[in-house]
Amino acid sequence: MRRGNNILQNIDWITVLLYLILVLVGWVNIYAAVYNEEHGSILDMTQNYGKQLLWIGTSVLLALVILLIDAKFFSTFSYLIYFLTLMLLIGVLLFGREIAGSKSWFQIGSFSLQPAELGKFATALALAKYLSGIDKDFSKFKTKVVAAFIIMFPAMLILLQHDTGSALVYTSFILVLYREGLSGNLLILGLIVAILFVVTLLVNKFIVIGIIAALFILFYLLNKAVRKRLFPLIGVFIIASMYVLSVDYVFENVLEPHQKKRINVLLGIETDIRGAGYNVHQSKIAIGSGGFSGKGFLKGTQTKFDFVPEQSTDFIFCTIGEEWGFVGSFILIMLFLALLIRLIFLAERQRSKFSRIYGYGVASVLFFHFTINLGMTIGLFPVIGIPLPFISYGGSSLWGFTILLFIFIKQDSERLELL
C-alpha cells in the first residue's frame, strides 16, 4: 500500500532533486554560452537561454502531469504510444523540415519538434511491455528477435532521416537486454566487431586478415577441444575475413562524407583543425583553458568569442570546462553518476517486471548520451551530434528526457501496487 494518500509522499525526491539541479546547471551554462551585454534579460525570447527557460517551465508541467496519471496507464498503452511515435517518425520523413542535413523536425511557426527525442521513451515502454509479458521467455530465439525489432525499427526510421547520432542511441538498449539475460558473449562480439572496424581503417585489410589467421592457428594448436571442431573454426575465420574486406565498402558507400571526415580526424588519418576537426580542436582548447577552478562565470574567452560552434547544444560541456574548470566538470560528472546509480537502485527494487525493465531503459539511454557527449567534446569519440541530457539547449530533447525520467519516477512511486 501507499505510504499515504498524497502522491508526493511516495515520490523519490532524490531523483527529482538531481533532475532539477542538472536542469538548473544546464540553463546557467546556456546563459553563459550565448550571453552578450546587449541581450542581458533572462526572459529575452530571442536568445537560447530565454527559450530554454520556457522549455524548462513546460517540462516541469509535463513532469507534474505524468505524476498525476495512474502508473498503470503507461504499461496499458505502451504499444499505442510506440505506434503513434512510429507514425510521427514516418510523418517527419514525408513532411519534416531539413536542418543541418537531417530531415527530422516538424516546424510549426517558430515551434520545432524532433520526434526522434520522443522515440526513446516510447521504445523503452514498448520493450518493457513486451519483455514483461507472462509468456515471454528471453532464452527463446523468437523473443530476442521481436525485442531486437522493437529497438531497431524506430532506429532505422531515424537513420533514414540522416540523423545517425540519434539512431545510435538505440544501441544502448542492448544493456537492458543484457540485464534480462542476453549473453555477455554478444557484448564481447560487438566490441570485437568495433575494434576490427577501427583497426581495418588504420591498417591494410590483408595484414588484418593475416593477423586473424595467425590468432586462429594459435588458438587451434593450443586448445585441444577446438581441434575436433575444425570446420566451424574455418567458418568463423571466413566470416571474420569477409567482414574485414567489407569495411572499406561500408566506410566509403554507407557513411556520409562528413561522418567519414570526422572518423578520419579522430583516428589521426587526417588533420583538419579548420574543417571537420575544428569543433573538437576548439572544444579541447576551451576545456583545457579552464584549468583547475575555471575562469569564472561569464569570463570564458573561448565561450564569449564563439570559438566553439554549437556551444549551447552539443558542446555545452566546453562552457562548463572553461568557466568552472576541473572542479565544475568533476561535480557535473558526479551528479550524472549519482543519477545513474540511483536509477539502477530504483530499477532493482521494483516489484513489477515492467517497471524494472523500463527503469533500465531510462538508465541506459541517459548513460549513452552522457558518455558519448562527453567523449565527443574531448576527442575520444567522433562528433555525432547528440545532446548532454538536461544540460544542452533544446526543447525536444528536454521534453524527451523529462518524460523518459518521470514515467519511471511515477512507476517507482506506485511500486508497492504494481505487479
Image (tube, grey):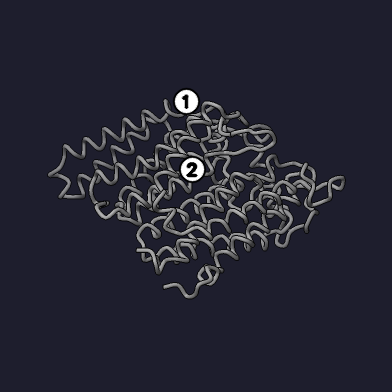
Residue 279 visible (yes or no): yes
Q: Nearer the viewer, residue 168 or 197?
A: 168
Q: Nearer the viewer, residue 418 or 55?
A: 418
Query: Residue 20: horizontal and vertical position, in percent?
Result: 63, 61
Query: Residue 37: horizontal and vertical position, in percent?
Result: 86, 48
Number of numbered discs present? 2
Query: Residue 294: horizontal and vertical position, in percent?
Result: 74, 59
Q: Residue at x 61, y 48 (%)?
A: 378
For the C terminus, the image quarter is: bottom left
**Label at residue 252:** 1
Q: Nearer the viewer, residue 38 or 246?
A: 38
Q: Residue furthest right?
A: 38
Q: Residues within 10 Å of mark 1 (few under 14, many from 20)?
A: few
Amino acid type at image mark 1: Glu
Q: Residue at x 46, y 35 (%)?
A: 87
Q: CA distance from mark 2 to mark 1?
A: 29 Å
Q: Disc 2 vs disc 1: which is toward the camera? A: 2
Q: Is residue 109 left or right of residue 215?
A: right
Q: Earlier in the sequence, mark 2 or mark 1?
A: 2
C-beta proximity under 8 Å, tags 2 and 1: no
The kind of secondary structure element at disc 1 is helix
Query: Residue 63: horizontal and vertical position, in percent?
Result: 57, 56
Q: Nearer the viewer, residue 418 or 121?
A: 418
Q: Residue at x 63, y 45 (%)?
A: 395
**Label at residue 119:** 2
Q: Residues within 10 Å of mark 2 (few under 14, many from 20)?
A: many
Amino acid type at image mark 2: Gly
Q: Is residue 131 left or right of residue 27?
A: left
Q: Residue furthest left?
A: 228
Q: Residue at x 38, y 52 (%)?
A: 128
